[in-house]
């Protein structure tokens, strides 16, 4: 018998309301412009206080699919006390060393504000909270199934030393494909991008640059170190424009075959990356084919699954169109 005053319909509505409350908010606009960016940022900038770092991928010299510099310049100018930040890279590139990295920044138009190459003066070790207990719990030889790939995982990550100089972090990401990760979203932007060039990135890649789930899990763990460090003072924007299957770290990236989609923003890293991937999968077959092949051939969706395993966010979201 139902409780007095409660009908089946009432119970269904209550359950539906509870489910909605358990979703993370992801804001979306098709307006890929400074105006669109500012509308998104206004919805997600709670916690952006003090000295703000804007982490983005500045790209190889003259990269063919980079975000237009105006979309970076116009946003940064509207964020008080902000600095664009980057780290050096591990692979052979002008961005491997600080001096030539600075020349690349000039080449790509980053002359409108200071750019902090965070590992120019060395590394800092960030702990990855909870990882030691997690690995101890699930590495038992008596277990037949693991929520992660057995192997060497991270309990701390070397980031650019100057990351610790900032109070807040805006993760401003050009979402695109990636040769090892399948796709590069907000997680890749900080998981690889905040790791120091010679130490942190080597921790993630390991010896021989192996691909697959183990690399992806180290990348996620590295990202967790950064998200835990900033706590409530971190937020995320993904721009789905110039969506090549190749990363901006490829100076010869192929021309995009997926149409531009829009801009997303959220305070939840898992929700924004999942929503971005979902929007790509929702495109017509000819538009989505190449990106889906790149994502799935590199087990890229494992990023999302492992972020959920490490409780980095919510894979249930409400897409709110502005």
Image: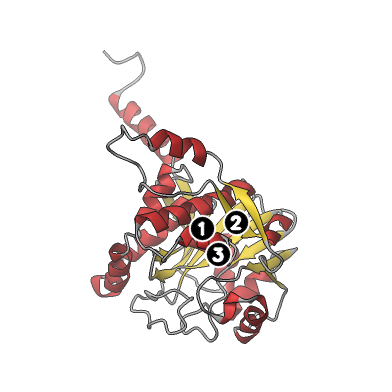
The reply to whether the C-beta atoms of the residues labelled 1 and 2 are less than 8 Å apart is yes
Measured in 3D between alpha carbons, the distance from the residue under mark 1 to the one under mark 2, in whole angstroms, is 8 Å
Q: How is the image coloured?
A: secondary structure
Foreground residue, 10 or 183?
183
Q: Earlier in the sequence, mark 3 or mark 2?
A: 2
Mark 3 against mark 1, which lies toward the viewer? 1
Is residue 274 in view from this perspective? no
Per the image, the residue denoted by label 2 is: 158
Identify the residue at image location x=35%, y=42%.
147
Q: Quadrant of the N terminus?
A: top left
Identify the residue at image location x=48%, y=76%.
248
Q: Earlier in the sequence, mark 1 or mark 2?
A: 2
Q: Residue 171's image quarter?
A: bottom right
Is residue 99 in view from this perspective? yes
Q: Position of residue 164 (x, y in %)?
A: 70, 55
Mark 3 against mark 2, which lies toward the viewer? 2
Sort mark 2 into few (<14), some (14-19) or many (20+) by Cα contacts within 10 Å.
many
Q: Position of residue 160 (x, y in %)?
A: 64, 61
The reply to whether the C-beta atoms of the residues labelled 3 and 2 are less than 8 Å apart is no
Foreground residue, 256 or 305?
305
Identify the residue at image location x=60%, y=71%.
88
Q: Secondary structure at mark 1?
A: helix
Q: Which mark is residue 203?
A: 1
Measured in 3D between alpha carbons, the distance from the residue under mark 3 to the one under mark 2, in whole angstroms, is 11 Å
Q: Secondary structure at mark 2?
A: strand
Q: Which mark is residue 46?
A: none
Sort mark 3 into few (<14), some (14-19) or many (20+) by Cα contacts within 10 Å.
many
Foreground residue, 193 or 81?
193
Per the image, the residue denoted by label 3 is: 193
Foreground residue, 299 or 200?
200
Identify the residue at image location x=69%, y=69%.
120
């Amino acid at each position: 018998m139902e409780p007095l005053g409660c009908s089946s319909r009432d119970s269904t509505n209550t359950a539906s309301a509870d489910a909605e409350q358990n979703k993370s908010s992801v804001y979306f606009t098709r307006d890929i412009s400074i105006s669109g960016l500012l509308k998104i940022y206004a919805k997600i900038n709670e916690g952006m206080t003090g000295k703000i770092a804007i982490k983005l991928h500045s790209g190889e010299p003259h990269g063919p699919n980079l975000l237009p510099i105006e979309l970076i310049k116009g946003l940064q100018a509207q964020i008080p006390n902000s600095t664009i930040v980057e780290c050096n890279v591990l692979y052979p590139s002008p961005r491997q060393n600080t001096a030539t990295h600075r020349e690349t920044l000039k080449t790509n138009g980053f002359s409108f504000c200071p750019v902090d190459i965070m590992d120019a003066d060395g590394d800092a070790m960030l702990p990855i909270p909870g990882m030691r207990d997690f690995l101890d719990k699930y590495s038992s030889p008596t277990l037949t199934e693991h929520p992660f790939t057995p192997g060497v995982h991270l309990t701390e990550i070397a980031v650019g030393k100057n990351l610790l100089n900032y109070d807040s972090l805006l993760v401003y990401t050009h979402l695109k494909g990636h040769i090892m990760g399948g796709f590069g979203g907000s997680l890749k932007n900080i998981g690889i991008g905040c790791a120091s060039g010679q130490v942190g990135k080597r921790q993630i890649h390991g010896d021989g640059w192996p691909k697959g789930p183990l690399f992806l899990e180290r990348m996620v763990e590295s990202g967790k170190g950064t998200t835990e460090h900033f706590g409530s003072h971190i937020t995320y924007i993904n721009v789905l424009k110039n969506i090549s299957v190749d990363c901006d770290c490829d100076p010869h990236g192929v021309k995009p075959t997926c149409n531009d989609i829009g801009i997303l923003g959220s305070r939840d890293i898992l929700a924004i990356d999942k929503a971005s991937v979902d929007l790509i999968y929702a495109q017509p077959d000819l538009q989505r084919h190449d990106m889906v092949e790149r994502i799935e051939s590199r087990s890229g969706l494992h990023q999302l699954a492992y972020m959920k395993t490490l409780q980095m966010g919510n894979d249930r979201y409400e897409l709110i169109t502005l």
